[in-house]
Amino acid sequence: MLLVLLWITSANYNNNLGFILTYLLAGMVLVSSWHTYRHLAGLEFRCAPIAPVFAGHQAQLQLEIANISAKPRYQIRIDHPGSSALSISLASGERRQLKLALPINKRGRHKTGSIVLSSTFPLGFFQAYATLDPEREWWIYPRPAPVRIPFPATLGKKSDELDFNGFRPYRPGDPLRQIYWKGLAKKQKLQILCYEPATDFEHSAWLDWRATPGRDIEYRLQILCRWLLEAERSGQAYGLRLPQQTIPPDRGSPHLHRCLKALSQFPHG
């Protein structure tokens, strides 16, 4: 509209300087639109998997942005729903790691939503934007109970049997019966067989919803969460019983996260 008014005024008064100013501004606008449109080209983005967190802690989306073009990129704005906007500039070939806070604090499974990149470089007349959908999900587990409550059942007992647990280099004083003689016969380095006590799964701990005190759903989930963490730290096998789901006894990080996800998906009261 401003250019049209300048052109009409210049034409009415036959003002050559007005024509020059009008065409100069028009040229700047056209060049600016091209630079703004091209300013987001040559950018690469990668999103890392989002680590699960407990309720009360804030999850973070780790984003890597790289400028693979031969020209620097200025005033790149990054927006994500609920997070503070970021504004960065990248030199040619530069990579940068960014962290976006995910504000949701309700237990369960969540998705990241879209990330919007925008820029008004160089003159602010136009805005170019691109929408990214990283398709990442993350889990928020129930908060562990702040006060320890005794287990509802005895932890699994160690059996007299031993499970093979790999090899280690021989050290002077190691018992001869644990030497891996077959490997020595194959001209391998002298190694020792390592064992660990086997877990008797028949006497594993069952962490049962019905054993949690009170009626508040979230508090009972917090108790189960704490029991799971303590059982995992003890190194014993444990199972989880919920009203609509039963997870058989096991141990290890994958089993722990499977149980914690089951708590996260428990219906809200």
Image (spheres, rainbow, N blue to C red):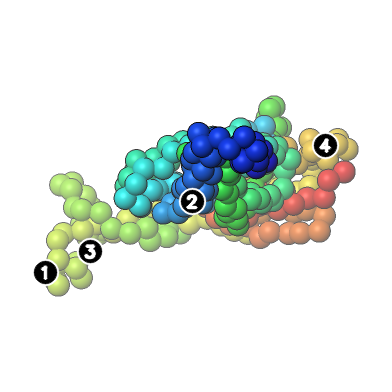
Secondary element at image label 1: loop
How many neighbours does mark 1 have within 10 angstroms: few (below 14), some (14-19), or many (20 or more)? few
Q: How far across and down, in percent of the image, does residue 36 sit?
A: 50, 47
Q: How far across and down, in percent of the image, does residue 41 sit?
A: 45, 54
Disc 1 marks which amino acid?
Lys
Q: Is residue 262 left or right of residue 211?
A: left
Q: Check whether the beta carbons of the residues at disc 4 and disc 2 lie within 8 A of each other.
A: no
Q: Check whether the beta carbons of the residues at disc 1 and disc 3 lie within 8 A of each other.
A: no
Q: How far across and down, in percent of the image, does residue 121 sit?
A: 49, 40
Q: Which mark is residue 180?
A: 3
Secondary element at image label 4: loop
Compare marks 4 and 2 and give the one earlier in the sequence: 2
Q: How far across and down, in percent of the image, does residue 155 sit?
A: 62, 46
The residue pinned by badge 2 equals 34
The residue pinned by badge 1 equals 187
Q: Residue furthest toward the front?
A: 14
Res 186 seen here: yes
Compare marks 1 and 3 and give the one earlier in the sequence: 3
